[in-house]
Image: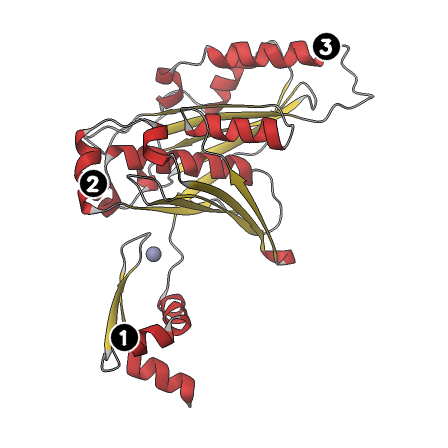
Amino acid sequence: MEINYNHSGQLLPFMLDEGIARGRIVRITDSSFSKEQLQTYPAIALKYLSQLICLGASLMGDIKNSGSMTLQITGGQYISLIVAEIHQDGTFRSCARISDENLKKLEETNLSFQELFNGGQFVVTSKLEEFNEEHQAIIEIHGETLESCLQHYFVQSCQIPTIIKVISKIDPKLPTKDYISSMLFIQKLPHKENHNLNLDIDDLWNTYKIFIDTLLPEEMLNTQISDPSILYRLFNQHIVHVFPEKKLQMRCNCSQERIEQIILNLEKDIMKDEPEKKSLSVDCNFCQKKYTVDLKKLFNNIST
Ligand SMILES: [Zn+2]
C-alpha cells in the first residue's frame, strides 16, 4: 500500500481478548512538521517531537468530546522547550525552542535522553473543552527513553500496567518515504469479574509483552506494512477488535485574532518597554507564519 502524503499519519485503536487490554498503533510521517521545522530543528529535536505527537495521540485515544492534550518538557539543559499539542479531531502542532549555541552542540554530539532533559519538567495537560476542565500530570524524567518515562508514570502513579514501544528514524535526508515515528501502546484494563475467557490475565499480559518485543524497527517504520497487518503478525493467536482508524494531520490553529489576543494580554509590558512602537511582527512558534499587528489600531479599538 503506497503512503498517502495528504495526511501526517494515523492512529488505529484496538482491543485485545475482549477487554483484557486496549491499545493503539500511531505512525507519523515527516509531513508532521513544517518545511521550516524540518530545515532548522536538529534531528534529535524532531525525534522527540515526533514521539510526543505519537504519545499525545495515544493518550487522546478515544476521548469522545472535544478536547486537547498538550505534552511539554521545559527546562532541559540543551532543549529549553519541546511541546506537542494534539486535538481530538486528529489535528496537531508542535515546536521546539533551542538556543543557537545549543543548536550547534546538538548537531555535533549525540546526547542521551537523560543528558537532554535531566532537570527539566515534563507536564501532560488534558483539556476537555465541553466541560471547561483541565487536568495536569507532572511526569518524572525517568529512564533512558521518553516511553520509559511514561511507562514508569502509568505503572507507579496510576497503577496501570502499560507497554509502550516506539521507534523513530529521523533521516538527515528528509523527506523520507518511511514513517519517521511509530508507536505501539497498550494498557491493561481493570479486571472484569465476569469476563468470559477462561484465561490467566497475567499470563496473557506477559504474552503480549513477548510478542511486542519481537516487533522490528523495519516493520514499524515501513509504510508498505499496514497497521492491521502489524496487529495480525503480533496477535493472531488472540481476539483482536479493531476500531475505526483516525487520520492525524499537522495543522496550526494560529490566527490574527489569537495573536492579537496574546498581545492584548501582554499590553502593559509592550507599552511600558517601547511606548512609541507602532507595529509588531510576530512569528508563530508552531508554523512560522508571520503576523504584523498594528498596535495603535489594536489598543485604540480596545479603549474606544
Ligand atoms: Zn501557527
For the residue carrying disc 2, how many other residues have a C-alpha within 10 Å: few (<14), some (14-19), or many (20+)?
some
Asked which quadrant contains residue 253, the reply is bottom left
- Measured Cα–Cα span from mark 3 to mark 2: 51 Å
Residue at (20, 28) in percent of width and height? 109
Alpha carbons under labels 1 and 2: distance apart: 29 Å
Tell me the SS state at disc 3. Answer: loop
Q: Which amino acid does label 3 sit on?
A: Asp
Disc 2 marks which residue?
103
Closest to the camera, between mark 3 and mark 2, is 2
Number of labelled discs? Answer: 3
> Circle 2 — which element?
helix
Label 1 element class: helix
188 lies left or right of 176: right
**Residue 209 point in image, percent of width and height:** 55, 13
Q: Is residue 115 left or right of residue 131?
A: left
Label 1 CB-ligand 1 distance < 8 A: no
Can residue 242 be seen here? The reply is no
Quadrant of the frame with the N terminus: top left
Q: Nearer the viewer, residue 70 or 159?
A: 159
Q: Earlier in the sequence, mark 3 or mark 2?
A: 2
Q: Position of residue 259 (x, y in %)?
A: 36, 66
Quadrant for ligand 1 reads bottom left
Q: Quickly name the residue at label 3.
A: 200
Task: Return the mark for residue 273.
Answer: 1
Q: Does the residue labelled 2 lie within 8 Å of ligand 1?
A: no
At 51% from the left and 31% from the top, the residue drawn is 150
